[in-house]
Image: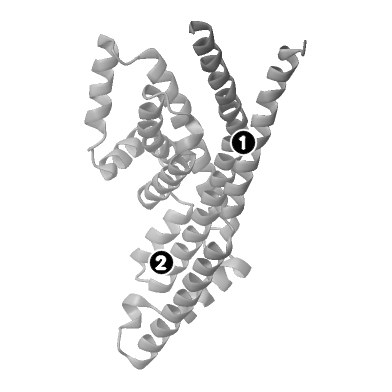
């Protein structure tokens, strides 16, 4: 008589390998021909836009004082990269913004999960706390930044706290809905980066947001757009890293989910046979 225990114990591992293969195919589809074609078209359109922008600025069709030109933007980036800004090297400002965003993601995620655990849905205290969180959502973010500056000063703590508040709103909702944190990791990282930069525009002496605000006060359009380019580059890198972590988590979760299905089907079939 064949050993059914060994055969049934081998099935989850086989299903797990199928789940890994499916996850691998999904990750490979991210760099497929269609995706490469879309990236090439996007790059071509960006180059065409920059060429038209430069031409319009040099021909006088637009005022370069307000919209600058790509060549001035490139010169500003070159000057920042090699000579640094008047408030320190560009790498220092990038590091400050990334540190604030990282602190915001960590603090907001932990605080959101902890509050969702302490104030569970369906309880009176949970409903009361959820109402306070709901009232916080439509609050003007600029007012929050100003309030945090008054309470925490102009240091990194105020900007990190502002980023953490934005992440907390998402983390709290995810935890109450029993959604894994990795499912919204990219969204949390984007909110934290936006919160850090917005806080730097109001209460900072360093960071990419500070460079944007200072260039705007000096009517330096080239500096504003150069800082925006740096911010976009940071956002792309952060999004790619968060997406890689999210896909890695999905690959680890896929074998467990796919491996459980054959056993469930076999158990339902066996129960049906026994009922007969």
The 10 Å Cα crowd at callout 1, few under 14, some 14 to 19, many 20 or more, is: many
The tag earlier along the polypeptide, 1 or 2, is 1
Q: Could you tell me residue 118's position as x and y percent?
A: 39, 13
- Mark 1 lies on a secondary structure that is helix
> Is 29 placed above or below 132 here?
below
Residue 89 position, x and y percent, is: 59, 59
Q: Provide residue 176's location: percent of width, then percent of height.
A: 37, 22
Q: Looking at this view, is 124 or 70 the one in front?
A: 124
Q: For the point 52% across and 64% down, which residue is it? A: 34
Q: How is the image coloured?
A: one colour
Residue at the disc numbered 1: 19
Graded by Cα atoms within 10 Å as few (under 14), some (14 to 19) or many (20 or more), the crowding at tag 2 reads many
Which numbered circle lies on residue 215? none
Residue 245, above or below 11: below
Name the residue rendered at 27%, 22% in the picture.
130
Q: Residue furthest front?
A: 276
Q: Seen from this angle, which residue lies furthest top?
A: 275
Find numbered disc 2 in the image and state the secondary structure of the residue it sits on.
helix
* Viewer-side label of 1, 2: 1
Residue 85 seen by the camera = no
Is residue 221 positioned above or below 61 on the image?
Answer: above
Seen from the viewer's position, the closer of residues 189 and 80 is: 189
Count of marks, rendered view: 2
* Residue extending furthest toward the bottom: 59
| Mark 1 vs mark 2, CA separation in Å | 47 Å
* Left or right: where 235 falls relative to 244: left
**What mark, if any, has residue 224 been given in the picture?**
2
The residue nearer to you, when weighing 33 against 234, is 33
Query: 146 and 122: which one is in front?
Result: 122
Quadrant in the picture for the N terminus = top right
- Seen in the picture, residue 170 relative to 266 is either above or below; the reply is below
**Which residue corresponds to the image point at 39% horizontal and 82% vertical from the top-left?**
53
């Amino acid at each position: 008589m064949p050993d059914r225990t060994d055969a049934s114990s081998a099935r989850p591992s086989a299903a797990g390998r199928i789940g890994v293969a499916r996850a691998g195919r999904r990750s490979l589809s991210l760099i497929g021909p269609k995706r490469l074609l879309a990236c090439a078209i996007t790059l071509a359109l960006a180059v065409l836009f920059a060429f038209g922008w430069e031409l319009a600025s040099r021909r006088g069709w637009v005022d370069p004082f307000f919209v600058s030109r790509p060549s001035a933007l490139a010169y500003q980036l070159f000057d920042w990269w090699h000579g640094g800004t008047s408030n320190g090297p560009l790498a220092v400002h990038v590091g400050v913004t990334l540190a604030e965003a990282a602190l915001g993601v960590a603090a907001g995620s932990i605080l959101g999960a902890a509050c969702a655990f302490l104030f569970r849905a369906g309880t009176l205290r949970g409903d009361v706390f959820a109402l306070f969180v709901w009232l916080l959502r439509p609050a003007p973010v600029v007012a929050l930044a100003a309030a945090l500056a008054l309470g925490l000063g102009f240091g990194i703590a105020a900007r990190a706290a502002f980023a953490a508040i934005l992440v907390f709103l998402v983390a709290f909702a995810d935890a109450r809905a029993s959604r894994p944190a990795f499912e919204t990791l990219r969204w949390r990282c984007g909110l934290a980066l936006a919160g850090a930069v917005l806080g730097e525009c109001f209460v900072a002496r360093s960071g990419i947001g500070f460079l944007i605000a200072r260039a705007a006060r000096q009517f330096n359009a080239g500096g504003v757009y150069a800082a925006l380019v740096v911010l976009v580059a940071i956002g792309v890198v952060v999004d790619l890293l968060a997406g890689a972590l999210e896909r890695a988590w999905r690959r680890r979760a896929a074998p467990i989910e796919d491996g459980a299905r054959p056993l469930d089907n076999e158990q339902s079939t066996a129960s049906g046979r026994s009922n007969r």
